[in-house]
Image (tube, rainbow, N blue to C red):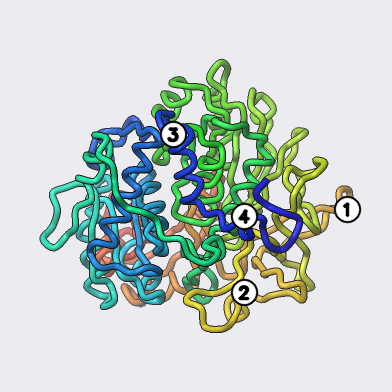
């Protein structure tokens, strides 16, 4: 086991990192399949789908690490990434870690405003991306971001054609898959498992907060998923959740490495492609948005013989974790995974028709099993919100300033962090039920927004414009924008580099651009 029954994990004491596990897998299973790209990836980005073995993946990771060092980046440099859910996203993240640097993955739909706000706060030194994702020119976006952040000295990416000044990483994939060995040797330092491995970004009512995570914290999250889903060694996994958040790393990257099986990536969301992937090989675990599982079940997407053994249904809006009659027909074991922003997650296996409540106190994985290990500590705070602590919870803001999360998240007497999610205690089970989102926030799909910030930027585009967040069955919320000239507001918001989910709130609904 990786974790012990303490506030620190055994992985921390042993110094185990995500990179250590990849290198071990490559040594033990060099020719086993590691990564399988979405079969439709050419429809949304450059390069045909890849299928890599563990030794090929390991070589590419070493080659990326070596290039980062060769261009002059030092250990602990922060390297931001922005990718769709393809092999490059996983390989680049691990390459940054192998180089002894800190990865800062950005959500795919973030544009200039959000990227600059996040990266300018952490001293980012480099940015690596895909040249194209669908119709979006991410190469141009990366150049715009770099132009506004003076600490960024290097911009690179995969795909083409490359703008002037871009560093290409494409050749590293071609060389490594052609069995060209890499001479890069990872640097080992004092207890690397406790060093910051990645920075992810949470959204609070006061804006974007960078959250530093150690290898030990990331592995604690991954172990909770692995244990609750009872995944065996070399399990086949399929994930629609990119490794661009704590949840993405803990639900996808860490369990994949710990299982040492193949990982199929799905760029959300294409039902026909998902069906083809499920038919290609039966998965032991499919990681999918919880709000869509019922809809997909009704469409018979999970019918035998292609049903995944386990469906890990993640809920970015845990207050919307619900029962659906269609889920009773599933030929798969359903495991709900409510997410609490970038603070933590819980994995809850359904034993009946309804979701399990979140246990109060120490959460062990697997729940209720003899010898289970502590992965989190959950409580209901005096304010009536869910508090989260334990091995997978973050412990410091980033960059470190000698303090804790106190300035961003209220901490309880036991050190647990206030997630901001209001909750109630279920009288029958004694567990917690999340009843709403954090105050001032709303979510669309996998993205959280502060309503105050959204309204402010919309008002700057048009003083008379306003926007409202309306409940949505599948996305959590949807935005409805109102203006005398929606087209003009849409153009202005797009020009300042705002998230397209906000820009689309002002789409024409009547066929006339000036409709109110």
- The answer to whether residue 166 is above or below residue 123 is above
Q: For the view shown, which residue lies furthest in the top direction?
A: 305
Alpha carbon of mark 3 to alpha carbon of mark 4: how far? 26 Å
For marks 2 and 1 on the same chain, the one whose residue lies earlier in the sequence: 2
Which is more toward the observer, 135 or 83? 83
Q: Quick one: label 1, few (<14), some, or many (20+) residues within 10 Å?
A: few
Alpha carbon of mark 1 to alpha carbon of mark 3: how far? 41 Å
Q: For the view shown, which residue lies furthest in the bottom direction?
A: 402
Residue drawn at 25 percent across, 55 percent down: 138
Pinpoint residue 430: horizontal percent, then vertical percent. Answer: 86, 53
Between circles 2 and 3, the one closer to the viewer is 3
Residue drawn at 77 percent across, 44 percent down: 367
- Residue 108 visible at all: no
Alpha carbon of mark 2 to alpha carbon of mark 1: how far? 28 Å
Would residue 104 be found to the left or right of residue 342 on screen?
left
Q: Which residue is mark 2?
A: 409
For marks 2 and 3 on the same chain, the one whose residue lies earlier in the sequence: 3
For marks 3 and 4 on the same chain, the one whose residue lies earlier in the sequence: 4
Pinpoint residue 315: horizontal percent, then vertical percent. Answer: 59, 48
Would residue 250 be found to the left or right of residue 497 on screen?
right
Between circles 1 and 3, the one closer to the viewer is 3
Q: Quick one: label 3, few (<14), some, or many (20+) residues within 10 Å?
A: many
Residue drawn at 42 percent across, 37 percent down: 265
């Amino acid at each position: 086991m990786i974790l012990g029954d303490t506030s620190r994990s055994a992985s921390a004491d042993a110094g185990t990192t995500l990179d250590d596990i990849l290198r071990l897998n490559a040594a033990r299973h060099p020719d086993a399949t590691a990564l399988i790209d979405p079969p439709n990836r050419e429809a949304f980005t450059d390069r045909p789908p890849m299928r890599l073995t563990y030794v090929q993946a390991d070589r590419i990771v070493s080659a990326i690490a070596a290039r980062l060092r060769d261009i002059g980046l030092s250990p602990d440099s922060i390297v931001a990434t922005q990718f769709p859910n393809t092999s490059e996203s996983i390989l680049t993240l691990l390459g940054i870690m192998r180089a002894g640097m800190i990865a800062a993955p950005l959500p795919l739909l973030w544009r200039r405003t959000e990227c600059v706000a996040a990266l300018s706060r952490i001293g980012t030194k480099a940015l690596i991306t895909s040249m194209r994702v669908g119709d979006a020119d991410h190469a141009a976006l990366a150049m715009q971001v770099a132009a506004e952040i003076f600490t960024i000295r290097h911009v690179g990416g995969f795909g083409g054609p490359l703008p002037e000044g871009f560093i290409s990483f494409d050749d590293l994939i071609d060389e490594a898959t052609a069995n060209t060995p890499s001479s890069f040797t990872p640097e080992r330092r004092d207890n690397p498992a406790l060093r910051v491995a990645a920075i992810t970004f949470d959204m609070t009512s006061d804006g974007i907060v960078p959250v530093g995570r150690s290898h030990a914290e990331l592995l604690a999250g991954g172990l909770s998923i692995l244990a609750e889903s009872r995944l065996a060694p070399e399990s086949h996994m399929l994930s629609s959740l990119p490794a661009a958040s704590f949840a993405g790393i803990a639900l996808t990257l860490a369990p994949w490495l710990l299982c040492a099986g193949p990982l199929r990536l799905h760029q959300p969301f294409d039902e026909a492609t998902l069906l083809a992937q499920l038919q290609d090989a039966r998965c032991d675990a499919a990681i999918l948005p919880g709000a869509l599982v019922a809809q997909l079940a009704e469409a018979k997407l999970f019918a035998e013989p292609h049903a995944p053994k386990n469906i890990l249904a993640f809920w970015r809006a845990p207050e919307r974790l619900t029962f659906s009659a269609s889920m009773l027909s599933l030929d798969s074991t359903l495991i709900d995974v409510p997410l609490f922003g970038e603070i933590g997650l819980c994995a809850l296996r359904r034993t009946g028709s309804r979701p399990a409540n979140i246990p109060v106190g120490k959460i062990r994985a697997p729940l209720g099993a003899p010898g289970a290990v502590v992965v989190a500590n959950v409580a209901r705070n005096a304010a009536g919100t869910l508090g989260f602590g334990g091995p997978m919870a973050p412990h410091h803001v980033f960059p470190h300033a000698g303090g804790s999360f106190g300035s961003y998240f209220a901490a309880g007497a036991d050190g647990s962090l206030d997630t901001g999610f209001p909750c109630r205690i279920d009288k029958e089970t004694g567990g917690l039920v999340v009843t709403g989102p954090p105050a001032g926030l709303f979510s669309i799909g996998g993205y959280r927004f502060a309503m105050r910030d959204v309204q402010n930027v919309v008002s700057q585009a048009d003083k008379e414009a306003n926007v409202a967040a309306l409940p949505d069955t599948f996305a959590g919320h949807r935005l409805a924008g109102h203006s005398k000239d929606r087209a003009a507001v849409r153009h202005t918001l797009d020009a300042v580099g705002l998230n397209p989910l906000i820009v689309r709130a002002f789409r024409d609904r009547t066929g006339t651009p000036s409709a109110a």
